[in-house]
Amino acid sequence: MSTKNYLSLGIMTGTSLDGVDLSIIKSDGKNQVIFLDGSSYPFPTNIQKSIYSILGSSVNNKNIIKIENEYTNFIIKKIKYFLNKNKYKIDLIGFHGQTITHKPKKKITWQIGSAKKLYETLKIKTFYDFRSNDVLNGGNGAPLTPIFHKLLKKKYKISNAVFVNLGGISNVTIFEKNIMRSFDCGPCCSFSNDFIQYKENKKFDYNGKFALKGKTNIKIVKNLLNNPYFKKKHPKSLDRLDIKVDGLFKLNLNDGLSTINSFIAQTIFISIKNSLNKIDNIILLGGGRKNLDLIQKLKEIFNSKKILLSEEIGIDGDLAEASAFAYLAIRSMKKLPISFPSTTGVSRVVTGGKRFG
């Protein structure tokens, strides 16, 4: 097996629709990684609204092609700006694209974004469409970050732990001794972002300051938790539109956001409660880790379990997923597996990622 190291640029735009994260790593795709540089760029409002308008689409059309083109052009512009600031010679790109529909039971997972245009513009080998091969082999197509979390666990000498990604949808990777399991917990920042957008035309609740002033509606939380998804056995994954939030919109801004955070905390607790006596730490990644109200609620519900922000162990929580897809591009280049029966439910260990260049 080749031990060659590659400089890889990871590009991630998540279900929270907040913007694009770029990260450069140097890695052999196996046991080593060095984080070199990274940055995040918010979406312009028009692109954010355009993507939101096509969520759940099943058929390509002229409007989707137009939106995909605008999205791709924005990504290329930010990559050029980012690479002009540093002198790294990039070997590979890992381009996740923007998920607009995820229905693994129907063997559908659709991420827009033209990897072909990225390659033709930047002249760098580009890996994309990381999820389809998993879905075609009976998997959920998500989460794909566990193998990267395993690398972080080794790099930072972390014992038995749970990595919790608080993105648009929350997911967990659970490490118990030599066992690695992963699945989506439930809606996360996508819920609170949609709510504050509807109520105040703001993009997100900065630091959770509105939620901190609110009061949780326990009845609504219980109703949301009645969704069959939360009783479903893992591996499992979730589409942004799978769980409806209609009952929330009658609440005022503060109470609605507090209620959403209580719901998020409960979905994470439900997901890992059976492993609590076997783990030492809960490590938080993703944008939701900056929401003080959500963190407070998580600390309350987990009591004595040690909850750590990723930065406390040396990991940039904003760039973790972009770094993961930079790593997955290297693994795809080397035809190493990126998903596993215990993480996505795939029928066998499979690699993934199509390639231009």
Image (tube, helix red, strand yellow):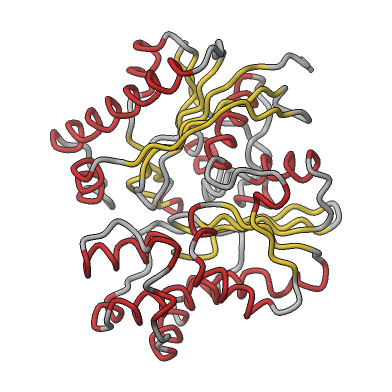
Q: Compared to 177, does 274 lie above or below?
A: below
Which quarter of the rendering shows the N terminus?
top right
Q: Compared to 357, does 20 lie above or below?
A: below
Q: Residue at x 32, y 23 (%)?
A: 77
* Whole-percent x, y for residue 190 in the image: 38, 59
Image check: 83 left or right of 31? left
**Most distant residue in the bottom direction:** 219
Q: Compared to 20, does 275 lie above or below?
A: below
* Whole-percent x, y for residue 300 in the image: 63, 80
- Of residues 136 and 357, the one nearer the viewer is 357
Q: Compared to 224, does 196 lie above or below?
A: above
- Of residues 213 and 356, the one nearer the viewer is 213
- Of residues 91 and 134, the one nearer the viewer is 91
* Whole-percent x, y for residue 78 in the image: 36, 26
State which quadrant residue 36 falls in: top right
Total numbered labels placed on residues in the image: 0
Q: Residue at x 39, y 35 (%)?
A: 97
Q: Residue at x 27, y 76 (%)?
A: 246
* Whole-percent x, y for residue 20 in the image: 40, 37
